[in-house]
Image (cartoon, coloured by chain):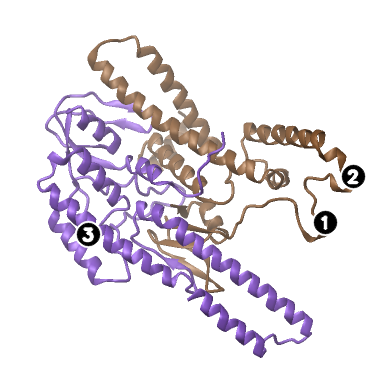
Amino acid sequence: MALPLPPGLTPPEVAFLCEMELVSIIPRQRLDSLDLLGGSIPALVPPHKTSVPLWLALLLKRQRRANIVPPPWLAPPWLTAILEYETEHPDTFSPPPRLPPAPGDHSIVFSPPFLPQSTVEAGPDALPYHWLELGEMLLEAATDDFEDGESVRRLLQGLREVRMAKLRKRTETLDEPGGIRMNGIGGMEVAEGRSFITGVVDGLRRIRATYEEKRRERGTEDGAGSPRTVDDYDDDEMETQLTS
Amino acid sequence: MDIDDLLAEVSAGAIPQQQRDLQELTRAWVAERCAPEILEWPENLMGRVLGRIRKQIELVEEQTGDMDAKTNFKLIIVQTELERFKFLVRSFLRARIKKIDAHPHHLLSLLPTNPRLLSPSEQQYLTAHQSLLSAHYAASFLSQFPAPLQKLDDTTGGVSMIDRPDTQSAVFARALRDCEVWSEGGGEGARVRMRRGDVWVVRWGGVRAAVERGDVELI
């Protein structure tokens, strides 16, 4: 009964989340509007573009009832520009899409996958949270809807490699005072890096906790107010070696 | 629908309740999958969602006899979505049961001060499961031990037998509104200003309050 999975979303679960992203389709058949549990689906009238969740778009696509319009950012010129940015900035991810302002105090704030960041109206110059999963799924299910699927695939691969290298490099600074900021990270990247990153952060914390405890113990044994002695200095050195 | 619902709808920018519930349920599921501690049972949300699922199942059952190709395809869509919702709810509940199984004594000690932490069925599961387990342990080996060693929740002697979740473990958090959280790194803690959309790796203890307020979500 209990879930046998470790904490944190697994890649299939991230893909499941991604399937809730809105994408634009051009229907090839009429379909009346439908009242679903997560809100109603507008009526599909060919050839008017409509935004539907990705899972429905994939279902319609597989049955040849619709064509999917790839989001603007999933096109070679924009992906090339983003890839350039990623290569030029070795320390940060490219900035995520601009967000609509947060609503007033009491209403719920929407966040990916429920923001329209992959419809035809989406901004072309930023990778949304589910960029990798969405790109892969569209390339797999709707290759014929891309003008140049092969370039898109190549660019996505390039982006993935550059960004994974950054994620690995970030692990060198996991012990920085003040926490770790990871703006622009993607859903699949969180899933892949989670166990390592949280493992390192938690491990360092435990090492430090034992060290602090020891120091406190020694402080009370010495009966001295100031704990900084030559011994402590040695310990500090050892700790830097451990953490570097 | 009464006047309060209508007013709530207007203030939320006329986004239908269904859409808001899906966002809320998804967020609750992700949070429950990522957080080291069990979170408060979202009673109102689950009531609405489960009610709608029940109605949808009835609808599907009613229409299954219909063999018309067009309604048939509609039914496929409805059923696909229904299955997705059921998956969300099931995975959410199972993630909670996992935490209940992992820290039963700890939760039992929390319940008197926070009775809304678990749903009635979860509370029932927790107490029934624990009494079965302790009866079983007592029957199979605990009764052979000297009386002072028979406890399952002994806290004397400096070592507690009660397993607690590690509230300081690292999580990925994303700010929904500008807010301040407590972040630690390199042995020092500091108040960190999170701007809307920022993603930080922080200790769960530092963001728990912000997550409960709805200013921060786990990813």
Q: Is residue A167 left or right of residue B121?
A: left
Q: Could one spot residue B117 in this view of the protein?
A: no
Quadrant that contains the N terminus of chain A: top right
Given the current orientation, which residue lies at the most extreme bottom position? A230
* Separation of marks 2 and 1 at Cα, in angstroms: 14 Å
* Separation of marks 1 and 3 at Cα, in angstroms: 58 Å
Amino acid at pointer 1:
Thr
Q: Is residue A222 left or right of residue A154?
A: right
Write the residue at 52% across / 56% down: B210
Q: Which residue is mark 1?
A: B156
Q: Which residue is mark 3?
A: A158
Same-chain check, marks 1 and 3: no
* Separation of marks 2 and 3 at Cα, in angstroms: 66 Å
Q: Nearer the viewer, residue B136 or B78?
A: B136
Q: Output the letter for the chain in purple.
A: A
Q: List x then y, in percent, for residue A104.
A: 42, 52
Same-chain check, marks 2 and 3: no
Q: Which residue is mark 2?
A: B147
